[in-house]
Image (cartoon, rainbow, N blue to C red):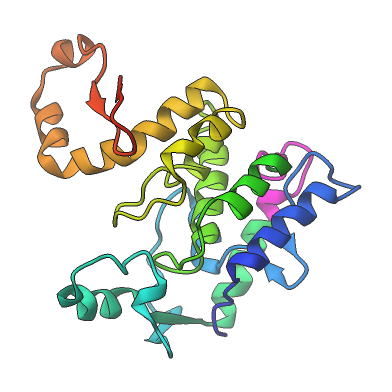
């Protein structure tokens, strides 16, 4: 069975449906009218809390009509296009037994009054409106739409990192994608600040910069530090990717 994909507009419409639901007015519906919002691979990761080996359960095939200029990789050197196409321009066909197992696990995890996943709160209508009408998320991510990726991050954080705000991961790319795309402009920061908490905004602003610091050897440097030295770190100060103001 082929993996179902949702367009950017379809994802926004599904998220809006969840806001207007009378039976689940404070939760985000997991079941879209035309199928689950996330593909089986992502739902399996949420259920298990990490990536899984699906060898023998899924077959990869080429994605017809793949256009790199409509993806987050459109800013890369054209020399990387064959590598990107080989890694990401694929479609997945799942065996029925795997789909049945994953769907059963999802249903079990969603059911019950104590279900943390089932109690997921809906997004703010004002936030979704800002993202849809004032930002540019109209490109494909590594697999599926940009909103597929952001929604997965939101739900994964809500379930597996309950002490943290999932809004941060839902908006982690809004001020800069790893391939130098910028869904929002710096002058829109006051609008964003009115839609999130101050702590959420601090993490959202820092994410694009920290993402670029990680490959510079920062993780290796921290890994070599003894525990006492790590505990003595008060923070990290850097210039934000979007805007000249430093953040700490």
Image quadrant where one finds the C terminus: top left
Q: Residue at x 41, y 29 (%)?
A: 203
Total marks placed:
0
Q: Is residue 120 visible to us here?
A: no
Q: Is 115 rendered above or below residue 90?
A: above
Q: Residue at x 17, y 35 (%)?
A: 219
Does 99 sit left or right of 136 as displayed? right
Using the rendered view, name the quadrant where residue 218 is placed.
top left
Q: Is residue 224 visible to us here?
A: yes
Using the rendered view, name the quadrant where residue 57 is placed.
bottom left
Q: Residue at x 29, y 57 (%)?
A: 179
Seen as rendered, the residue at the extreme front is 187
Does 194 sit left or right of 17 as displayed? left
Does 45 sit left or right of 73 as displayed? right
Where is residue 110 shown, x and y percent of the image? 70, 50
Q: Is 192 rendered above or below residue 51?
A: above
**Residue 116 forms part of the magenta stretch:** yes
Where is residue 79 shown, x and y percent of the image? 15, 76
Where is residue 166 shown, x and y percent of the image? 54, 37
**Residue 40 forms part of the magenta stretch:** no
Where is residue 59 shown, x and y percent of the image? 41, 84
Q: Is 35 rendered above or below residue 226?
A: below
Does 247 sit left or right of 92 as displayed? left
In depth, the one of 93 and 243 nearer the eye is 243
Query: Does the magenta stretch mainly form a helix, a strand or a loop?
Result: loop
In depth, the one of 14 and 183 nearer the eye is 183
Highlighted range, magenta: 108-121
In depth, the one of 164 and 144 nearer the eye is 144
Image quadrant where one finds the N terminus: bottom right
């Amino acid at each position: 069975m082929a993996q179902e994909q949702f367009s950017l507009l379809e994802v926004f419409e599904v998220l809006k449906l969840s806001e207007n639901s009378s039976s689940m007015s404070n939760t985000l519906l997991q079941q879209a009218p035309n199928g689950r919002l996330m593909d089986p691979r992502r739902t399996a990761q949420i259920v298990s809390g990490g990536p899984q080996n699906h060898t023998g359960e899924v077959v990869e095939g080429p994605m017809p009509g793949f256009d790199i200029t409509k993806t987050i990789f459109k800013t890369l050197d054209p020399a990387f296009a064959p590598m990107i196409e080989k890694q990401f321009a694929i479609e997945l066909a799942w065996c029925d037994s795997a789909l049945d197992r994953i769907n059963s696990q999802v249903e079990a995890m969603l059911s019950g009054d104590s279900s943390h996943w089932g109690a997921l709160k809906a997004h703010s209508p004002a936030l979704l409106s800002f993202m849809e009408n004032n930002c540019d998320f109209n490109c494909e991510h590594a697999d599926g739409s940009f909103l597929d990726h952001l929604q997965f991050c939101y739900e994964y954080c809500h379930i597996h990192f309950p002490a943290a705000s999932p809004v941060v991961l839902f908006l982690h790319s809004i001020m800069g994608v790893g391939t130098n795309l910028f869904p929002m402009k710096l002058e829109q920061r006051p609008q964003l600040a009115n839609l999130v908490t101050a702590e959420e905004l601090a993490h959202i602003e820092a994410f694009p910069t920290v993402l670029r610091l990680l490959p510079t050897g920062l993780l290796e440097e921290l890994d070599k530090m003894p525990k006492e030295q790590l505990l003595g770190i008060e923070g990290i100060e850097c210039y934000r990717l979007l805007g000249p103001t430093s953040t700490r």
